[in-house]
Every structure is written in structure tokens, then in C-alpha cells.
Amino acid sequence: MMKPELKGKKKPNEPVGLRGLLSWFTSEGFLNDVLKKRLGISDNLINKFKNNLQPKKKIHLGAYISWILTFLFIIECLTGMFLMMYYHPTIAEAFEDVRYITNIVPYGWLIRGIHFWGSHLMILFVFFHLLQTYLKGAYKPPREITWISGMVLLLLSLGFGLTGYLLPWNQISFWASTVVTEVPMAFPYIGHYLKLIARGGENVSQVTLTRFFSMHVMALPALTTFFIVLHLIPIRKYLIPRDLITHFIAILLCFALLISLATLSPAPIHEKADPYHTPNKVKAEWYFLAAQEVLELAQHLDFLGGWAPKLMGVLIQIFVILILFLIPFLDKNPARNIKKRPFAVTFISIGYCAFIILTLVAKFK
Amino acid sequence: MTRYPKIRILLLTILILSFVLLPGKANSSEKSKSKRKKRSRKGKITCIICHEQLGKEKALWVKQWQESIHGKNNVTCPACHGGDPSSFNKPKIKGTGYLGKPSRTEIPEFCARCHSDTSWMRQYNKRTDQLSQYKTSKHGMNLYQKNDTKVAVCTDCHGRHDIPEVSNPASLANHKNIAETCSKCHGDADYMLPYNILTNQLTAYYNSYHGMIMKNKVDGKNPSLVPSCPDCHSPHGAKPPEVAEIANVCGNCHMQTEKYFHDGVHKVALDEVNKPRCIDCHNYHEIRYPTTDLFVGESMFHCGFCHLTNSKEYLRGLKIKEAIENAEREIDKVEKMVLTLQETPGLDVIDLKENLQRARRNVLEAVPRTHSLVEEDVTKYTNKALALTNEVEQKVEDMKEEFVTRKKGLFAALMVIFFLICSLLYKRWLLELKEEEI
């Protein structure tokens, strides 16, 4: 029995067939049949995208850095996912797994190298982004939330570096993590408990490795994603960047730099962690060197006696971070032009110079 | 009864207290016992009281005894010298068993009263065969048979009143000091003149590989594990090893080497003509680190000293030498390659290093087998070492090649990226032109 056709009901689309499928690969077909008809993207958005393809002469550096950072975060997630396919966070297997990834897994060395250098570049660009945003005065109202979420993202990036550093379970990472997790001991009374929380015990052990691994692959990525969204909500109208082509070129250049570093200077392997053999000099990664140096310099305050020197070293750093967080509220100068903000510019210049000098001193002494 | 309740209560209390305090009384009687003991010790201390007052050397004996192993274990004066030290009056009188200062001939027996007494020494878990061993030694035989009092007796090596435990680094008989102690007599040419024996043993020993380790001149070697005089000559039964004993003496430590020596043709010769002994190739006292150079040359300790240089045996030695040297050379060469490769970060050379260590262990296995003088026994291990080394060398080449391939791959990827960037720049330029036209 034939089904009666209903009057007024919209007629379903005719199947396009293979010829129709081929037409999707033309610019006209892709625009009309795929984007507009099937994905339902509005003309307005498409026009904006097209408009953003147009080259713009005045694009500030910060726009590129922010997109490079987004790109690096995605790269870190992807390469991290591949590494997790072979990595087991146990003290018996971790080091051997890293060796397996590097030596046996096809292109494992490249994936690991990209993940390794990606993390360094990410932290480097975060520092650049902070400086550029500050100089541009982009933290001023109504961008306070963006600035604060950006500061949180900076700390999260450092957290990625800290937790990821232990995962290969080699001598350098083990002892550097031992030194870093000793820092909370600067706090009187609660220091020991903070250390226990960080390590999961008195010493860096299997519990610490599991703890750091779960932080590195679960907590930190989730938090970072959340804060990236929070960071971008106030500037969502710039989500499709102006001058798309130039942005894409910048990302390609970053990718070229990444694979060059991963190939020419592969991620090191070192020796397996040995809790009974302390290396002569334990140094943290470059982004923690300044902090390490501040702690060492604070030892000269020994005339304060007891736990005060160590505590001062930690408090100074917490104070600097706190000041950075509160910059949008402390700086009441409405001007954004750096020429009209001499005090603010001097403050950040001194801060960055101190950071670089302390890092270099710690690196080469 | 009720007239004196207070007295009754008092009496009852005394009775109860006497019961309660009875054990206390018993304790106090024990205390008095130990006091008596102490007094008897105090009696022993009468020696000390006088000797301390006498001053100089006699007071020094007391001090030395107090710091000695005997003093620490409460082995007091009468234990060695006899007598009744509980009295100040006449401690040396006959009938108290006073022995006084023993003569040199008496000393071994004097010490052996305790040190050969198994029931007494059991508590200290010490050996008790010193005297019987001493009697078989050159020292003991000269002392008892020739009445030669110049020979060493217990006190010469262990001290008199200042006798630390042998494990104490301050002891003359400690492993680190014993060579010097022996040399006090054996290094004295005048003293040794009547015996017609060499006096350069200590210098020779310190020039030897054993002595260099003892002097901490060889990295990674433990001085407490190398032999000193008593390890070859026996501590108490000291005398030079006989011809037939030498291989056994050396074999006490060099067990593998001894085994292969016994399997080899040299053992047959040793049984028949008393040669070659270990010392014929390696010298004695001045035992240098053996190298494959011993296989070449006609000088003393070298193969050519006994064998004709065109003989079958000499040529076999050369082949063994070549096998070992070739393996060592190859390992050294490849090790340098690995160390160079290691300088590139990220290149994993852990397995390569482990394989080289295995190769070295195989060479170490081959070296004692040279004593069997069977070429195949040696080459079996040197070939294993060579195979491992070649494997490592191949891996090094592969890694180098792979690194070059990676660079080529990088170049290709960079070219693609460059092409993409050029295309994008061209597109951008086109868009700019279009915009200008508009």
C-alpha cells in the first residue's frame, strides 16, 4: 500500500551521488554544499573568515604568540597522548619505557623530542606573552579576568614542567624533583606536611611518580583547558584571528623550529634514577633556576637565624607572583601607551632582568 | 591486748615491712657480693696503684694495658703475670703463682695459656691454634730447637701491654700494617745477616701490584682484599712456601687461574722438574700486573727465558697473546666510538656500554685460561668478546647512519614547510593585490 504524500511537508534532499561528492572538493561546492548547507555555518561567519584572510599591516606580535601558544598546547596534548600509549608510571618501568619509546617505537624519538622541546618553547612563549601583554597594558579594565587567568596558565605551565620532569625517572629528574619538593620545608610547622603531600611520603618514590603522572596527564590538562576557555571568553571576537595566513605562517615556523630541535638535539635519556647515588650538582630546569638561585641567595640571610632565611626565599617569590596577579588592581594609571607608564615599565624591566640574571648565574656558576 | 595497740600496730608494720624489704635485703647481699668482686678487682688494681706511682715506663704499661683489648675485656694483670694482687704487702711471694716478666723463649707458651685454651677462648670466638702453628714456623723452630731468641715471638707483632685487636688499624698485626711490622726485622740487613735471607721484601712488595693496591694507588681496588705477608706465609706458622705449595698459595686467591694451571701442560712439567712455578713467570714479592708482554722476549719471567723463540710452545704463546690483545684493542676502539656518540644528547648508548662490559668480562674470562696454554680455550672467549664488540660497532654505525637519515628527513620536512610558507606568502600577496585593485 502506497504511503500518501503529505502536503506542505518539506521535500527531503536528493542524494547527491558520487558526482556531488566530487563537487565538495571545489571551492564553490565546499562553501555552498558543505559549509552552508550541511554544517549550517552562516554567511556572516563565512564572510568574516574571508575578510580575515585579507592581509593586515598592523598585527601586533602578541597575536602571533597567543596562537603559537594554543598550537603548542595542542601539540603537547597530542604527543603526550602518543607517549602515554607506551609509558607506565612505575619506577620499575618508567625509565625503560622512555628508552623503548626513543629506540624502538617508530618515530618515538621524534614524538618525544617534540613533546620535550614543546614544553620548553611553551614556557618560553608564556613568558614572552606575559611581557608583551603587560607592555601593551592589556591587563587594564575590562581585561582583569584575562590577565588573572593568564597568570594561572603561567603557573600551570610551570606545573606541567615540574610534574613532567620526574616522569622519565632518570638521575637528573629524580634529584631535581627531590630538591624542588624539599622547598615547602621552608614553611615552619606546616612545611613537613606540605612536603608529604607533594611526595606522598618522606622520599621521592613510586607514590610521587604516580602522583606527578596523574597531575601531569589529568588534573593539569583539565585545569589548563578550563583556564584557556576563561582566558579567551573576554576576547572571543578575536577568536578568528585577523590576517589568518600570516598566523598560519607563524605556526608553521614554530613547527619547523620544534622538529629541528627534536631532530638535532633529541630529548636526553641520562641514567636511570638511583636514590643511593647523589649527583655532584643538582640543577632544576632553566625556568626554575632563578627560583633556585633566590633560595640559595636567601641563605645569606642566616643572621635571621633558624628557618627564617629559607622562608624569606620562598616568601619573596610568592610576593612577586602575588604582585603580578594583582597588577590590574594595583596599576591605577588608565594610560596604555608605554611612554605614559614609566613606573610600570621600569617594574617589569627590573623583574625580567632579575629573572634572566639569576637564571644565568645559576646556570653557569 | 588492747592496752598496747600502738605497739602491736608498730610490731605488725615492722613484720610486714621486713617481708617487703626482704628481697631488698637479698639485693643488698648481692650488692655486697659484687662489691667483694669489685674489691677483688680492687685487689687487682693494687698492681695499678703501685705501677702508676712508680711512673715513667711502668706507669705507661698501665695506660697501655687499659687501652688494650685485654684491658677492655677485663683481662687483668694476674691473668698473665699471676700472683695475688689483693694484698699490698708481698704480692710477689712464692705460692701466689707470681710469674713476673717472661723471657722471650717463654712468651709463646705464656700467651698460649689463655689463647690455646679452647674453653676460655670460646667466649671471644677466637682461634686457638696459634702456638701449634708457631711451633711449625721458622720462627718457632729456631726458638725451640736452636734456642734463637732473635726470632719473632708474640709480643713483636702484637705488642706487650699495648695489644689492640688485630682489626684495629693501630695494631702492628693489622692487615694494613703487618708488612711494615714484618719488615722491622726482615728489612734489617744486619739483623738478618746470620740467616742469609733477602731484606728487600718490603720495597719489592710495595712495587708489586698487590702492594700498590695496599697503598691505595689503584683505583677501584680494595686494599683489605689484597694479600700481605701472612696471607702467603701464614700468620703464625710463617715460613717460605715450598715448591709444591706455591701454586696452592697463589691459588688461595687466584682460584680460577690455579684451576687452569692444573689443567695445563705446565703442571705436568712442575710435577716432573719442579718448574715452572707461579713465581717463575710472575716473580715473588715484586709481582707486577701481568700483561701479554710476558709472552714475548727472552728475559727473565718471559716465555723465551725457558722456551726457544722458534719453538712450537713459544709460537703458541704468541697466538694466545695476539688473541687477547686483538680483543682488547677492538674493545678500546669501539669504546671510543661509543663515548663520542654519547656526546650527542638523546642517543641511547646504555645497551652499547653494557655489551662492551660483557665483552670485557669475556676477555677477563680468557686471561686466566692462558695458564692452561690451550689456544682454543682462550680464543673461545676472545671470539665471544670480538663478536659482542662487532655487534656494538655495527650498532654505532647504524645509529650514526640513522642520525644522518633523521637529518635528511628533517631537511625534507623543512623543505615542505618552506614550500607551504612560500605558497601562503604568494596567496597573501595575491590577496593584497586584489585588495589594492578594489
Image (cartoon, coloured by chain):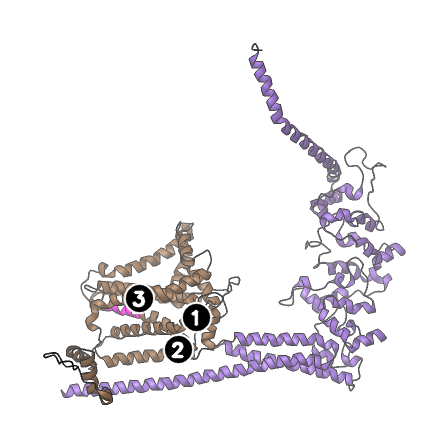
Residue nearer the viewer, B175 or B257: B257
* Residue count near mark 1 (Cα–Cα under 10 Å), binned few <14, some 14–19, many ≥20: many
Q: Position of residue A23 (x, y in %)?
A: 22, 88
Q: Which residue is mark 3?
A: A224
The single residue placed furthest to the left in the displayed view is A8
Q: Is residue B313 magenta?
A: no
Which amino acid lies under the numbered mark 2 shown in the image of this protein? Leu
Q: Position of residue A76 (x, y in %)?
A: 35, 72
* Residue count near mark 2 (Cα–Cα under 10 Å), binned few <14, some 14–19, many ≥20: some
Q: Which residue is mark 1?
A: A87
- In 3D space, how far apart are the residues under numbered discs 3 and 1 (Cα atoms)? 22 Å
Chain letter, brown in picture: A
Q: Earlier in the sequence, mark 3 or mark 1?
A: 1
Q: Which residue is mark 2?
A: A261
Q: Which residues are magenta?
A: A126-135
Q: Quick one: SS at disc 2?
A: helix
Which amino acid lies under the numbered mark 3 shown in the image of this protein? Thr
Does residue B97 lie above or below A327 as drawn?
A: above
Q: Closer to the camera: disc 2 or disc 3?
A: 3
